[in-house]
Image (tube, rainbow, N blue to C red):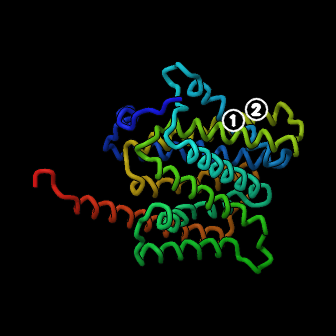
Amino acid sequence: MPLPNRKVAARSAPARADRPFRGIALILASTIFLGCSDVTAKYLSATLPSIEIAWIRFLVFAMIMVPAMLPGTRLFALQSERPGLQVMRGVALLSSSLFFISGLRFLPIAEASATGFIAPLFVTALSIAFLGEKVGVRRWLATIAGLIGVLIILRPGSSAFHPAAFFPIVSALAWACTLIMTRMMSGKERAITTMTWSAITGVCILSALVPLVWVTPSWHDILFGIFIGVASTAGQWIVVLAFRYADASVLAPFSYTQLVWVSVLGFFVFGEVPDIWTIAGAAVIVASGLYTAHRERVRQRTLVEAEPSPNA
């Protein structure tokens, strides 16, 4: 299969537009879809194994992306310059989903979601090794503060600690790896190509694993599983659209509204009320994430100002 010319691939990518309010509106909409997907996954975890829930999710994801898998069609998107990296990203995305769903079986959804929001802090650390970025003292202090927030939520050593609390942490690390690999392919691969490879990778791996834990689902379970797949895919796609209109540093503060949705839905569906430790720890994680986003904006502005003028 011939690989596309880089210039051709770059021209086919949608142009960025500076419309921050549209980007913010999209990111707010994405949190509703993703929050509903997480709550439904927790609901299903009472009757189905985590691997099976993830398999249904990725199967629906792959079915949605089928038009991009058909050669000769306008949407065909399997041509990739970095197929190995695409597969690795798919494995990381699958791991993030699987570990998070596994944690939902044992943890209140607000606690699991708040812990999962430390992913940007892992991105800060991983960007040094894989992207060659320089991280200043203030961003490191923000990262440490975020980790302290996680400890406040989890309270290791106390009677409130549950070993399953490590699942959303590993999920956040896997999601951070997903974001790092996305950045590594930025400008070289289309979003639809990345999503198609992720769908194929996830469904292939899970199809090999699901027979080991198979529980025959009811029609009720299947319908909820389909909803999870549709909602999570829609949420991810809306996030991709949002980044066309605004930078990550602008959108990051609004992504935390997902905590509000899962907390509200967790109360009405499961009767869960976040305790004071979860609220306090989440506040610390959000604050550290917002400061990290602020420092990223300052860094980008400094880089732009340092570039020589083309008219110089």
Residue at 43%, 68% in the rendered image: 291
Q: Quadrant of residue 219?
A: top right
From the image, which quarter does the N terminus lie in?
top right
- Between residues 223 and 140, which one lies in front from this camera angle? 140
Q: Amino acid at mark 1?
A: Phe
Residue at 70%, 53% in the rendered image: 266
Q: Amino acid at mark 2?
A: Leu
Tag 2: Cα neighbours inside 10 Å, few (<14), some, or many (≥20)?
few
- Between residues 94 and 255, which one lies in front from this camera angle? 94
| Residue 257 left/right relative to 153 | left
Q: Quadrant of residue 48?
A: top right
- Residue projecting furthest to the left: 312
The residue that label 1 is drawn on is 227
User: Percent from the top left, x then y, of residue 11?
Assistant: 35, 33
Q: Eyeballing the image, is 198 above or below 219?
A: below
| Residue 169 left/right relative to 301 | right
- Residue projecting furthest to the front: 2
Whole-number angstrom distance, CA of label 1 to CA of label 2: 6 Å
Q: Eyeballing the image, is 82 above or below 255?
A: above
The residue that label 2 is drawn on is 223
User: Percent from the top left, x then y, of residue 167?
Assistant: 72, 61
Q: Secondary structure at mark 2?
A: helix
Residue at 39%, 32% in the rendered image: 12
Q: Eyeballing the image, is 182 above or below 62?
A: below
From the image, which quarter does the C terminus lie in?
bottom left
- Residue projecting furthest to the top: 72
| Residue 168 left/right relative to 20 | right
Marks 1,2: beta carbons within 8 A: yes
User: Percent from the top left, x then y, of residue 122?
Assistant: 55, 65
